[in-house]
Image: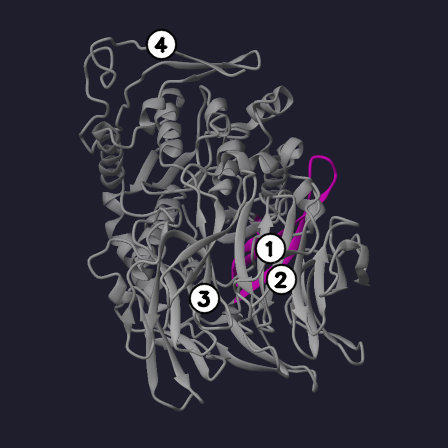
Amino acid sequence: MQKSVVVLFLLMSTFLQADDKPAAAATGTTPPVAKKIHTENHINGGTLVDDYQWMREKSNPEVAQYLEAENAYADSVMKSTAALRQKLYDEMVSHIKETDVNVPYKQGDYFYYSRWEKGKQYPILARKKGSTETPEQITIDVNELAKGQTFMSLGAGEVSPDGNLLAYSIDNTGFRQYKLYIRDLRTGKDSAVIAEKVGSVAWAADNQTIFYTVEEDKTKRQYRMYRHNLASGKDEQVFEEPDERFNVGVGRTRSDKFLMLEIGSHTTSEVRYLDSSTPTAEWKLIEPRKQDVEYYADHRGDQFFIRTNDKGRNYRLVSAPVNAPSAANWKEIVPVRPDVMLNGLDVFEDFYVLEERQNALPELTIVNFASGEKKRIAFPEPVYTANPGTNREFKTKAYRYGYQSLITPASVFDYDVEKHTSTLLKQTEVPGGYDPTKYASERVWATAKDGVKVPISVVYRKDLKKADGSNPLYVYSYGSYGIIVPVNFGATRISLLDRGVVMAYAHIRGGGDMGKPWHDAGRMMNKMNTFTDFIAATEHLVANKYGSRDRIAIEGGSAGGLLMGAVTNMRPDLFKVVISHVPFVDVMNTMLDASLPLTVGEYEEWGNPNEKPAYDYMLKYSPYDNLKKASYPAILVKTSFNDSQVMYWEPAKYTAKLRTLKDDKHVLLLKTNMGAGHGGASGRYDRFKEVAFDYAFILTQLGIEGAQGSGDSIVTGK
């Protein structure tokens, strides 16, 4: 059993140090010194010492005082970069088309789209009836919702089948707790708040009933589903999931015939279904959950089409009759393949699309129901991202998909499933002198510690003098939850590329880049592979002269921030600059506290440290617990006060502890956004300012702050 022992050095006040100094120095010219209150947690034969547990008390004014002192210090250190930050910000803005419109998609009688207006932080959502030539109707102007707010995020946005009503949800704190409203699109009038802490939303066919899920207070998981009737105004609980590992989410099939309730943990799932025309009927179960088996269902005609990993980790495709969909009646369509991950499935009236991954690259394969003919969409570059677009129509001859790469801007295509041709509808315009022919991208493979080959995507200027290995090198990764590191285009990236930085994206184990087995090889008791893969990838890039050993910057966020903390502890000599966003660094204390949001559900990703084998293993890499007396790189830690996923105190505690241990003169900064959540600032211009801050930190620490920037010849001198 867990036993905590708290030793207070002060009896008079728990908020002062032994010499009665404030919790943090108020000056911005010297690093703040956080007070210490010694606590010990004795568990599994070990002792976890934590001098900064007091930072968890969000209502304690000294917590905000400490964070503001760190902000003041960071601003003081970065004051000399003001001109560079402004230049970077101006470059980033110059590379976006500030007034722009996205490609409309058809849903029912309307064409829906979003657009941006110059100077505005948020998109405007709109539609046109019948064709794209009719007058515009604005459905939601997020800028209007954001008036008087420091943060605004639009969550759900589901239009009723008849097109008259819009169910939408918003969060104005960053804590990812959304309030649900119904907007009458005929009048523009909003209802009162329907519900709070809402996640998913789906309409029944009667245009009067919506189903929505809500989060549990303690765990912050989506655990209940309600049915709301607009005519009566009544809400009825339909389902509750008691297992804290599981979340619930409701949606509607593209066929419009069924509503689907997905209930899933990190490793296990089940699906319940309901005919959308009978919203008060009983939800039926396709197949009861089995530990470590996941399945997901779509619909066409009298069949469900089910993607499942019951016979292998990379999933197979089966069908089942709607009137008897249990596993006993599953008929295999696509078998499990050891080298191909079936990532997703889109079902239409006349065809279906397999979303697959092979050799760490995405593939889209169109399969005709009548003929069985298969056509794989061809892509022109060696490293790219391709993904389904917005496809709301069930009866269609066109499949919309997106394509982009490290050098090709986001592009929207329609694929004609009869002619087998792709038509480019739009490629995002990148003004400001961007010329894609000046850049090159490639895929390289590093050899991991255990001999496994790890893919890396690399992009750089073609005129870079790569052969001498003197270039500054930037390496990014994530490596958890089976999440794929996308090889996307980023206009902000141009500012680093044009200053001679080689940029690399490591597809390490723990992510999903090479399928589900790749994820398995970097989670639970295999987690160390994630960190050693990243180190191996970085060393490979240096050995092959992509960058200089003494000019390496690395970046990651959330679980990628765990990666940053772990590899910095393991190899502080390898990296020059580290940027860690909302980092999950206090692994042991967080995972031992089941009262925190997400903890129990995360046992299937990291392990349960209440069990000694997991405790011993997790303790080997937990960044906060492995800080030591050493010379560390220059480090920028960023967090948000309203983060609901990685609480602000993790990076704050990490920074405070590291300040007492590092024996170098390299800068250590903690920057807290006091009015945002896990994703940082919500407005697009505010985000550019945050990125400009990060890039200025990288450039100054790498000694290339004097580079001319976008459009100019490369300057890489120190």
Q: Which residue is mark 1?
A: 457
Answer yes or no: do the residues labelled 2 and 3 have beta carbons within 8 Å?
no
Report the Cα–Cα distance between label 4 and label 2. 55 Å
The tag earlier along the polypeptide, 2 or 3, is 3
The amino acid marked with disc number 3 is: Thr
Category of crowding for the residue at label 4, using alpha-carbon neighbours closer than 10 angstroms: few (below 14), some (14–19), many (at least 20): few
- Give the percent coordinates (x, y) of residue 10: 25, 10
Q: Which residues are magenta?
A: 439-468
Quadrant of the frame with the C terminus: top left
Answer yes or no: do the residues labelled 2 and 1 have beta carbons within 8 Å?
yes
Colour mapping used in the image: one colour
Q: Quadrant of residue 278?
A: bottom right
Report the Cα–Cα distance between label 3 and label 1. 47 Å
- Give the percent coordinates (x, y) of residue 370: 78, 80
Q: Which residue is mark 3?
A: 209
Camera-side mark, 3 or 4: 3
Find numbered disc 3 in the image and state the secondary structure of the residue it sits on.
strand
Category of crowding for the residue at label 1, using alpha-carbon neighbours closer than 10 angstroms: few (below 14), some (14–19), many (at least 20): many
